[in-house]
Amino acid sequence: MMLTESYRDPFAHAFADIAELEVKSAAPRPTLRARRTTADRVRAALRVLTGGLGTVLSHDEKAWASITFSGTRHEVVFEFCGAEAVAAGEELIERLPDHEFAIPGQLVADATVTAVDHRFGAMERLQVTAVLLLLEEG
């Protein structure tokens, strides 16, 4: 014998009017984009200096730390092909050491050009290796 007895249909909600139901998954989902890393931000800042005319051949990032500071060292190799692109590469060489970078959460302590390979001929080509030393703010 049951102590409580209910005559209510336990499945009534399953057969309810569909218009009364709230569907939460019908709203379009926002598209997710990948979070930009510090390396992405460094490449983007250098691309601005080159006017978008250089091609990144390689980018090496190494973490480092001392007793008082921590950060990363970025070595980026750019290639510039053609007279206009080579002029942009020469502009990068000239402006990089004095450029004020705006990378969130990072302070660019040093930015130098460590290697330049300039080839003349029918297709002028310039390869520039830039090294940036970043310190974490905070």
Image (spheres, helix red, strand yellow):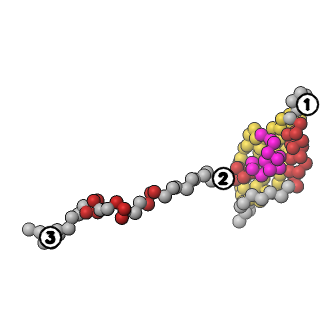
Q: Quadrant of the C terminus?
A: bottom right
Q: Is residue 67 visible?
A: no
- CA separation, marks 1 and 2? 36 Å
Task: Name the kind of residue labelled 2 in the image.
Answer: Arg
Image quadrant of residue 66?
A: bottom right
Q: Residue at x 45, y 57 (%)?
A: 25
User: Mark 2 — residue?
Assistant: 36
Q: What stretch of residues is rendered in magenta?
A: 43-55
Of residue 23 and residue 66, the one placed in the foreground of this image is 23
Q: Nearer the viewer, mark 1 or mark 3?
A: 3
- The image position of residue 44, as x and y in percent, is 75, 50
State which tag comes first along the sequence, 1 or 3.
3
State which tag comes first along the sequence, 1 or 2.
2
Q: Nearer the viewer, mark 3 or mark 2?
A: 3
- CA separation, marks 1 and 3? 94 Å
User: Mark 3 — residue?
Assistant: 5
User: Mark 1 — residue?
Assistant: 120
Of residue 94 and residue 108, the one placed in the foreground of this image is 94
Q: Which mark is residue 34?
A: none
For mark 3, does the 10 Å Cα neighbourhood hold few (<14), some (14 to 19), or many (20 or more) residues? few
- CA separation, marks 3 and 2? 60 Å
Q: Quadrant of the N terminus?
A: bottom left
Tell me the element at label 3. loop
What main secondary structure does the magenta stretch of the protein show? helix
State which tag comes first along the sequence, 3 or 2.
3
Report if the CB atoms under discs 1 and 3 are less than 8 Å apart. Answer: no
For mark 2, does the 10 Å Cα neighbourhood hold few (<14), some (14 to 19), or many (20 or more) residues? few
Task: Name the kind of residue labelled 3 in the image.
Answer: Glu
